[in-house]
Amino acid sequence: MEGEVVTPPPAPVERGWPRAAALFLASIFNPGLFAVPYLAMLAGLPVRRRRAWLMGALMALMALGAVGERTGLWWAERGWALLVGGWFVALTLSRPAAAFLPRALGALVGAGAVAGALMITRADAWATLNSQMVAVVQAASDVWSPGLKGQYPEADVAAMLKQIADVQIMLFPAVVALSTLSALGVAWWLYVWLGHDSDQGLLPLREFRFSDHLVWVIIGGLVLWLLGVKRAGINVMIFMGALYALRGAAVVSYFGVGQSFGGAAMVMIALLLLPQAVLMAILVIGLGDTWLDLRGKARAMTSVT
C-alpha cells in the first residue's frame, strides 16, 4: 500500500559456537587455562541461569581433578590462570562496556606484571619452572623418538628433537600467552552463553581488530631483539605477530574471501601448499590495516553509494 513503511528483515545472526570451538583448539586443550577463569567469572560477575553453576562444577573437576602429577608446573599453570581470571573480572567490572579483547589483553598484562614481580622476589622460581618445562619437553621427545629412529639415522633424530625442544622452550612465554588468550575467550563465551542466554559473547572473525597503538609493541619486540634481549624480543614479536595475522585474516574474511565452499577450499589448499607464504601475506595485511583501515574505508564507500 502507498505510504506504508516497509521494515527490512533483521540481519541473520551468526552462530557463536564455531568461534569458541576455534579458540578451544588454540588453547591446546589445557583444562586449567579456561576452567579457572570461568570459575573466577562465576564468583565475581552476575549470573542469571542455574546451568552456569552446573558447568562451574564440571570446570572445578577439570581444573582440580585433572589426571597427572601435581608438580610445580601444574600449580604454576593454575596460579597463572587464576591471576588472568581475576584481572579479567576486575577489568570487566570497571569497564563493562569494553569489548572482550581489550579486557583480555589487559588481563594478560596485569597477570604478567604480578607474575614477573613474584619471579623477581623469588630468585629460584624461574629456574625451577624452566627446569620443569625442559622435563615436559624431554618427555614428549622420548615419546616421539622411537618412531623417528625407525625412519631416520639416530644422530639426525637426536639433533632434530633437540632443535624442536630448544624452540619450544624459547617460545614458551608466547605460546602460553596465546593459549591463555584463547582459553579466556572460551571461558567468556561459556559464561555469556550459560549465564545470560546469548552465544554472541565473541564477535565474528571479520570484526576482529584491536588498538592501532599496539603496533608499537611489536616494534618494541624488534628493538629488544636488536639490543640482544633475544628471548623477550622474539616472544613479543611472535605474540603480536599472531594477533596481526588474525587481524589480516579478519580483513580477508570481511571482503568475503573463503566464505563460500569453493573459496574455503582454495584457502585450505593454499595453506597446505604454501603455508609460510599465506601466513606472511595475512600478517602483512593485518599490519597494513593499522594505517589503511581497509574495512572502515569499505564501509564509508558503501554508505556513500
Image (spheres, rainbow, N blue to C red):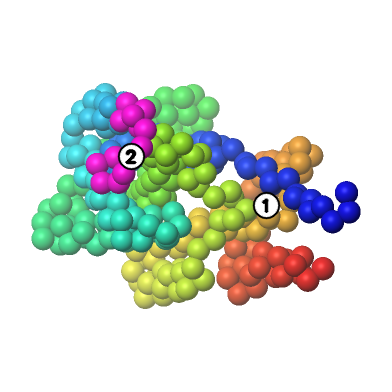
Which of pointers 1 and 2 lies earlier in the amino acid sequence?
A: 2
Q: Is residue 89 visible?
A: yes
Q: Are the residues at dot 1 and dot 2 in contact (C-beta closer than 8 Å)?
A: no
Image position of 80 with respect to 237: above or below: above
Q: Which residue is at the far right?
A: 2
**Residue at 21% of width from left, 56% of height from top?**
115
Point out residue 89 in the picture as x, y percentages from the top left corner. Answer: 30, 51
Quadrant in which the C terminus is drawn: bottom right
Residue closest to the eye, 148 or 76: 76
Looking at the rendering, the stretch of residues picked out in magenta corresponds to: 42-55
Residue type at mark 2 is: Val
Tag 2 secondary structure: loop
264 relative to 106, above or below = above
Residue 47: give its label.
Answer: 2
Compared to 152, does 10 lie above or below? below
Q: Mark 1 belongs to which amino acid?
A: Ser
Q: Quadrant of residue 97?
A: bottom left
Estimate how packed mark 1 is, as few (under 14), some (14 to 19) or many (20 or more) residues with alpha carbons within 10 Å.
some
Q: Of helix, strand and loop, which one carries label 1?
A: helix
Rendered image quadrant of residue 119: bottom left
Residue at image point 59% right, 38% down? 15
Query: Is residue 73 in view from this perspective?
Result: no
Residue at label 1? 253
Q: Nearer the observer, disc 1 or disc 2?
A: 2
For residue 100, side relative to residue 173 (left or right): right
Q: Residue at x 46, y 36 (%)?
A: 197
Where residue 248 appears, as percent x and y from the top left, is 61, 58
